[in-house]
Image (cartoon, rainbow, N blue to C red):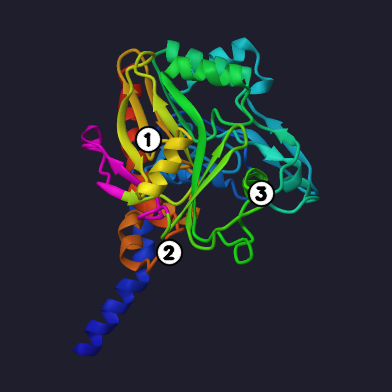
Amino acid sequence: MKKKILLSLLAAFLLLPGWLWLAWWLQPKRRLTVAIIDKTVSGPSPQEHLSLDWVLNQERFTKTATRGYGPGADYFGFFPGSDRHYRLKGLERFRPEDLERLATDADLAYFTDTYGVYTAEWYGRLPPGSRSTLLYGGMSEQDIAFLRTMKARHKTAIAELNSIGSPTPEPIRREFESLYGLHWSGWTTRYFPLLDTMRNPDLPRWLVDNYRAAHSGKWPFHHDGVAWVNNDGRVVVLEAGTTLRRAVPCIKTTPAAKGLGLPDSIGYPFWFDVLEPDTAAGPNETLAVFDIEVNPDGARLLEENGIRARCPAILRHLGADYGFYYFSGDFCDNPVGYKSSYFKGAAFFENIFHGKVSDGDRTPFFWDFYRPLLTAILESEYHRARTR
C-alpha cells in the first residue's frame, strides 16, 4: 500500500508541469494592445522588456484575437541581427498619421528603456563599462508626439528609469515632465554589492573615473554601497559601515498602493532615478518611495549635494482624462526565464523552491513586486479598454 501511495505521489509530481501548462492554456485569451518601446536590446535576449512580456503571457493577454506577444518581435526600437548588423524599427520612422493610427489602436503605451545602444557594447572595441558613441537611443520627437496623442485620447502610458535620462535631449525631457507632472533631479542611483575595483570588474569604469577626477585620484571604497551619478558627471558614493546604516535601497509602499498586492517594503538593488513630483503641473499620487538608510555623515554628504535619501519610486495618475505611471527604477529588467510564464501558478512554486538570494539579486523583486504590480495594472487597463 505504501509503495502504491509513493508511486502515485511520484507520478503526480512528474505530471505537475503538464497540468500547470494545461491550466495556463485553458485560460481565455484577452486582447490588450500594448505599444512597447525598448531601445536597449543589444543582445539575443530582450532583457529590458522581457518581464513585461512574461506577465502578458502568464495572464494570457494577446496582441491580436489569437496571437500572443513575442518578446523578440513585438516592440519598437533596436533589433539586433547577426554579424553586428541591426535594424532600427522605432517610432522615428512613423509619419504623424502613423502615430495617430498607433495611438488609436493601442490600449497602453509602455516605454521600458530608451538608454539605447552604444558602439562599445555593440562592436566590442572598448572595455565593458567604458563611455562610447551613441548608436541609437533617447526619447525622440516621434516618441513624445505619440505620448501627447495617447494622453489626448485619454489613454494610459507607463515609463521607467531612463525614459527621460541621458541620452534624451533636454527639450524632450522638459516636455515629458510638463506633460505628466514630474521632475527628474538629474541624479540616478544604484546599489553595488562590492565597490572594490580590484574585486568587482563589473563596476562601470566611467563611474570610478568621474569620482577619481573630482577626488584627487582616490577611490577609497571596499565594501558594498550606493552610488549617485548626476547628469553633469558628478558622482557621490556612500558605503556600508561608514555612511550607510543599510546598504540596499528599500522600496516602501504608501497607503495609495492598497489593493495592488504589493509588500510593505522590499529591497531594490539596481538603477533608479531621483524624482521630484511636480504637484503644480500634474495630480500624481505616490504609490511607493525609495528609502536609503543613511547615518548622520551620509545624510550630511547627501545634503551637500542636494540629494534626497527618500524619493518617489512609483507615481500614478488615473482619471477620465488620462492614465500615467512612472516607475523610477529599472523595473522591467529582471533575471527571469520566459518559459516559466507558460505555467499557471509559477509564482507560487517560485516562492517555494527558490533558495537564499544575495543582496544584489533582483529575482525576489520580480516575483514579489513587479509581477503583482504589472498584473494589477494590466487587469485595470483591460477593463478600461473594454469600456471606451
Tell me the SS state at disc 2: loop
Crowding around mark 1 (Cα neighbors within 10 Å: few <14, some 14 to 19, many 20+) is many
Residue 186 position, x and y percent, is 53, 30
Considering the image in quadrants, where does the C terminus appear? top left
Helix, strand or loop for the magenta stretch, by majority: loop
Residue 28 position, x and y percent, is 34, 40
Identify the residue position indicated by label 2 in the image.
358
Choose between 337 and 324: the one closer to the eye: 324
Q: Which residues are magenta?
A: 243-265
Choose between 210 and 347: the one closer to the eye: 210
Residue 316 position, x and y percent, is 34, 27
**Kind of residue indicated by mark 1:** Cys
Residue 259 included in the magenta stretch of the image? yes
Residue in the image at 50% along x and 19% along y:
176
Question: From the viewer's perspective, is the residue at label 2 or at label 1 nearer?
Answer: 1
Estimate the spatial distance between the alpha carbons at disc 1 and disc 3, rounded to whole Å: 31 Å
Location of residue 124 with respect to 309 vertically, above or below: below
Tell me the SS state at disc 3: loop
Q: Are marks 3 and 2 in contact (CB under 8 Å)?
A: no
Residue 80 position, x and y percent, is 70, 43
- Residue farthest to the left? 1
Q: Looking at the image, can residue 137 be seen?
A: yes
Identify the residue position indicated by label 1 in the image.
311
Q: Which mark is residue 216?
A: 3
